[in-house]
Amino acid sequence: MLGEVSLRVSDYISQHPMRPALPVSGVVTTATRIHISPCRDSDNMEDLEDGSGEGQIPETEEDILTEEDLRDIQEDLSHIEVTNGDSSQDPDAVWDNESFPESYRTNSLKEQTLLSLANNFWRQYTHLYPDRKPLLMCLLNECGLEKFVCTTLQPTLLPYSDLYNWRECARFVSEFLSMDPMNSPIELPRTLFSSSSVLQRQKGNCFDFSILLCSLLLGAGYDVYCVSGYASREMCLMDESREVCPLLEKTKESNGEPPKKPNKKYSVRPPRQLISRFELEQEAKHQAKIQAMHLKEQEDEEQRQAEAEKAGPDPLYGLRVHCWVLVLSGKREVPENFFIDALTGNAYPTKDEHFLGIETVWNHENYWANMQDCHNGCKDMTFDLGDPVCWEVMLMGSSKPLLLIPDMEEEDIEEEEDDNQDQDSRKIFQMPPSWTLPIVITPKEFEMRSPHGKKLLQYKKSVLEKWAPYLQKDGQVACLTIYQDTKYSLEVEVQSWFQNRMDKLDMRQQKRQAGVTTEYFSPGRSDALKVHTYRLLAPETERTMIFYSKARLDGLERREEKPKEMTEIFQGRTDFLHCRHTVFGKRPKKVAIAGGPMEANPRPVLKITERFYRNTEKPANEDVAERVFLITEDRINVRYHRHDDHITTSYWEFQKPSNLGEKGFSIVLSPESCISYQVESSEKCNKQLYVYETLLHLQQGELSAKEAVRRAEAEVLEILSVRAQEESDPQLMISIYDTERNEKSKEQREALERAAQEERLQSALLEQDYLAPFLARLGDPERLTRAQAQQVKEDCLRDLKQRLIEKANLIQARFEKETQELQKKQQWYQENQTSMTQEVQDTYTEYCSEAMFRIQILEARLTRHKELAPQKYLALEDRLNKDPRLCEGHISPQPGGHQ
């Protein structure tokens, strides 16, 4: 008799159309509840065969097969080639069962009981809901052993702070693994590997992605669950070509109007505008009509474009199997429930239209089957897993609270809870621990992220490339290319991100059509450059430089340069200067010096305008607000700040004399050369000395301004030169703690280790070779003559004898010194014994005790040295007689043939 009969997927679909998770009715009554009790597979099969089990299915005449029909079915099935429908079985992945732990190859008693419970749950579920698709419960692991899905989860907290947040954790999983699509998009996988094996392969399907992400989030303290259900084609195939890149999503601008400035009580009324209101209203209506027409045309064009880009109908809509992660609110300050697609790392609300239905959810503690209607996707679903009407739990005693009945009183609730606790204490079955190996990610793997350190993501009109740090020579880690159309033919903008650059470059934005490049730098550059916008890296072209003003001595914040103009903005200066605008003239032709190269003359400065903030320590009439130096016209205009209660400002207009500042010449200041307007008249303003000193001060300011402009031009040239050199040969920063990449530190460390090793070997050799210093006196000959051997022997014995004598003399000298000091102390005590206090006597007694102890030690050392000295001498003499270098066979003959 045939045990199990398997049909092809196509035959099964043609005979039984598949539908998403839809129970027979919207509400599950008590009579249709699934009851789980520990049992064995054999018992269940016997119950089904003899008709006594709960899962008994009544047989009809159509269901009865004769013996001849069974033979025909067996013959047909013998010609069917069984193919592996699981995408996770990678042909390149060859698993050695012996290399896995025992938990991969065998099931414990508790796991066998769990499989029996799961089998019982599955039988009752398929009997009560025959129209629903099978559940994902028990799958094969790497060793071909059946394991329950809940035990595949391994809650793990890795030692990386980036993985403590769900967003960064989801991004890491989506980048670290590459998607391996399932062979059949409408069938559940037959195998489910452990997360450690998935990390080793660095690829997997949506179930592998979700299992790994759920394990990491559980370790980080989130209330997360794996979800098996149905999703859209784009979600299952990880197709983001119709989605906008997250890096391009702009925050919504606030529609609030800027606050209006309060009108002052005493202010000048604006002049009356002699314009017809009727004409203004008609013009506004006309402009509004034109704007509405343009807006409608734009909306129609966008709608037509969206229709053209819209994907065609999916023949498998609602049937595509997918797995994702559910995050419930409560833990880790999560405000509301949401989904995470582990393939892309993106978060979605639970009502998103991409998710079409849910079959089951599970975590490391329990397993739930969905009993809710999914005709409207997940929009109307509730995720209270303690509600027995909406979710069918497999193991009783879950950590999720049960749904409370509102009509029950508190005493009844407490009594029922006590009864449930007594019953649960006898019936609760705890989920066995995970059978998988611990999840381990090395720092190198965490840094590499993607397989081979590269990742390519395709979005709507944009392509995002990612690299691991230090993989690119210029330190580039990401590049976003924006195109004009969906065919990716014409580049519009390129955004590049960098890390670990010596020049502190963080990002470069290139607008292809406009030809404008913008570079962003982090703090730490010597020139304090923050943002650099330019068309060409050439001087005297249009550019904008923004600086870290607090890192510069001159407080420069912004410098805008054009071919004929330059504007500088300052902040926090002591002289309250906040703006300097310079106008240049046409550069004169190059001048050839006799016998030298052509030299370019600097650009002539035509006009310099400086503006200052208000200095409250000075009167407004004396606080300069603006200075204009008309250099080619020899004129200087000065305007002062205005008082709050005034409507006009004071100003000076000077025509500089040709001999201003020269000694020995008289200067006449006429009313035509010094024009002044003073809001508050002052006597000193009418004095020639005050006017002359003011003019000299302005002339000095003009010279200082011209010098500042020349310094600014030189700084621009230096920055451009440095940037060109940095781009031609980019250098990367390497931490001193990065021992793998820091070549200088690595070479230095290896050199120190070699030197230390050589020193240790040399010192060990010297310690072992007691003849080394005596042979060195003779030049380290390979063989010794008889006279040399005798000399080495005598020198060695003489040296040992001398060292023994010196050591004995040293001990004897210390012994005599201690004895003399003790005698002197005793003599002093005899002389002053009558006048001593008790404290001095105690000190003397303590000193005598310590001195006698030292004398006894020295005496013992001296006695021992006298006993051992002859023995050491005889031992060395015997060693010299036996040393092969001093023996007859190794002594070279004497010159002249005599030995």
Image: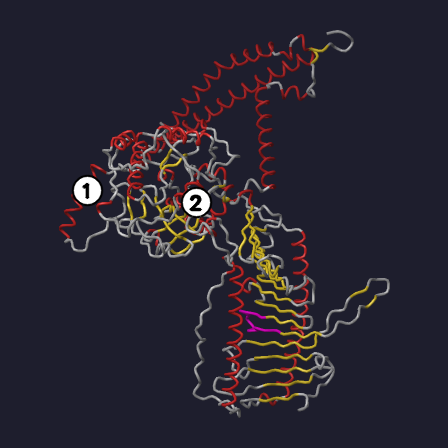
In the rendered structure, which amino acid carries the disc numbered 1? Gln
Q: Is residue 579 magenta?
A: yes
In the rendered structure, which amino acid carries the disc numbered 2? Ile
The residue at the point 69 percent across, 10 percent down is 891
- Secondary structure state at the residue bearing disc 1: helix
Distance (Cα) linking label 1 and label 2: 42 Å
Is residue 836 among the parts visible in the rendering? no
189 shown above or below 259: above
Q: Quadrant of residue 420?
A: top left
Residue 656 located left or right of residue 101: right
Q: Residues within 10 Å of mark 1 (few under 14, many from 20)?
A: some
**Residue 486: percent from left, percent from top:** 57, 58
Which residue range is magenta in the image?
A: 569-580
**Residue 474: percent from left, percent from top:** 62, 50
**Considering the image in quadrants, where does the C terminus appear?**
top right
519 shown above or below 265: above
The residue at the point 65 percent across, 72 percent down is 704
**Considering the image in quadrants, where does the N terminus appear?**
top left
> What residue did someone put label 2 on?
186
Q: Residue furthest right?
A: 595
Front residue (pair 331, 593): 331
Q: Is residue 40 magenta?
A: no
Q: Residues within 10 Å of mark 2 (few under 14, many from 20)?
A: some
**Residue 502: percent from left, percent from top:** 60, 52
**Residue 203: percent from left, percent from top:** 49, 41
883 shown above or below 184: above
> What residue did someone put label 1 on?
421
